[in-house]
Image (tube, helix red, strand yellow):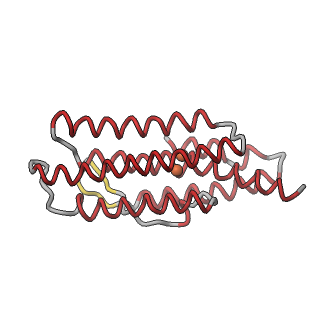
C-alpha cells in the first residue's frame, strides 16, 4: 500500500512538463524501489510473521542529518530487541522476561516522544504543508505504544511478534514514505534559501 502511494506521488510521468521535478521523481523512484527490495529481504521468523534485520542503509536516509541520527538510534534499538528478545529463548510465560520486553516498550515510547517532537519542530520552522497529516501518524504510533503497555498492565502479556509487526510498519509506512517526503521538502526549502 505504502509502495503504491509512493509510486503514485513520485512517478516521473507526473512531471512531464517540469524537467527538474521529473529528474527528482526519477531519483525518488530509484530510491523507493531499492528500499522496497531491501524490505523484502527481511528474515522470516514464522510463516505468519517477519522480522526486520535492523541494518541501517543509506536508502533510509531522509537527508537531514539530525533526523537521520535519530533514525539510526531507532535501528540500534531494533537490533537490541532482535538480539535480546526475538532471537533469544525468552518465555512469554515468565514474569521477568515479560518485564524485560516491557522495558523495551518503555524505551520505544521515550524515543518516539522525543523523535516526533524533533521532526514536528522542523516542520513548524519550515512551514511544512503536510504537518497535520504527518502529526496524526505520530499520534497513532504513540497510541499503539500505549496499547502495548496496557496489555502488559492488564494481562502481564506482551507479544514479541506484535511488537515486531508494529516496528516493521513504522519503518515501511513511515520512515520510507512520510519522513522521506518531509526530508525532501526540507532540502528543497534549504536549497531555495541558498539560491536567493
Ligand atoms: Fe522519523
Ligand atoms: Fe515522522
Where residue 50 appears, as percent x and y from the top left, is 31, 53
Q: Is residue 130 above or below residue 159?
A: above
Q: Is residue 174 left or right of residue 9?
A: left
Judge by depth and name the residue closer to the eye, 33 or 59: 59
Q: Is residue 82 above or below residue 157?
A: below
Where residue 8 appears, as percent x and y from the top left, is 63, 41
How many numbered callouts? 0
Where residue 139 appears, as percent x and y from the top left, is 47, 35
Residue at position x 69%, y 56% in the image: 26
Snapshot quadrant of residue 80: bottom left
Judge by depth and name the residue closer to the eye, 120 or 179: 120
> Which corner quadrant holds the C terminus?
bottom right
Snapshot quadrant of residue 145: top left
Residue at position x 50%, y 58% in the image: 70
Q: Is residue 127 left or right of residue 178?
A: right
Snapshot quadrant of residue 153: top left
Judge by depth and name the residue closer to the eye, 33 or 183: 183
Amino acid at each position: 500500500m505504502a509502495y503504491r502511494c509512493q509510486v503514485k506521488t513520485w512517478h516521473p510521468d507526473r512531471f512531464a512538463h517540469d524537467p527538474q521535478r521529473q529528474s527528482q521523481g526519477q531519483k525518488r523512484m530509484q530510491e523507493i524501489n531499492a528500499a522496497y527490495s531491501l524490505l523484502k529481504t527481511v528474515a522470516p521468523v514464522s510463516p505468519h510473521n517477519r522480522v526486520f534485520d535492523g541494518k541501517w542503509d543509506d536508502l533510509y536516509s531522509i537527508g537531514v542529518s539530525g533526523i537521520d541520527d535519530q533514525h539510526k538510534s531507532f535501528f540500534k534499538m531494533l537490533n537490541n530487541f532482535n538480539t535480546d528478545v526475538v532471537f533469544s529463548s525468552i518465555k512469554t510465560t515468565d514474569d521477568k522476561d515479560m518485564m524485560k520486553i516491557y522495558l523495551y516498550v518503555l524505551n520505544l515510547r521515550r524515543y518516539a516522544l522525543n523523535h516526533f517532537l524533533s521532526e514536528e519542530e522542523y516542520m513548524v520552522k519550515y512551514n511544512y504543508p503536510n504537518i497535520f497529516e504527518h502529526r496524526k501518524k505520530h499520534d497513532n504510533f504513540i497510541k499503539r505504544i500505549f496499547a502495548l503497555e496496557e496489555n502488559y498492565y492488564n494481562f502481564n502479556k506482551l507479544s514479541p511478534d506484535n511488537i515486531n509487526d508494529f516496528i516493521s510498519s513504522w519503518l515501511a509506512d513511515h520512515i520510507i514514505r512520510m519522513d522521506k517526503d518531509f526530508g525532501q521538502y526540507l532540502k528543497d526549502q534549504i536549497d531555495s534559501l541558498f539560491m536567493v
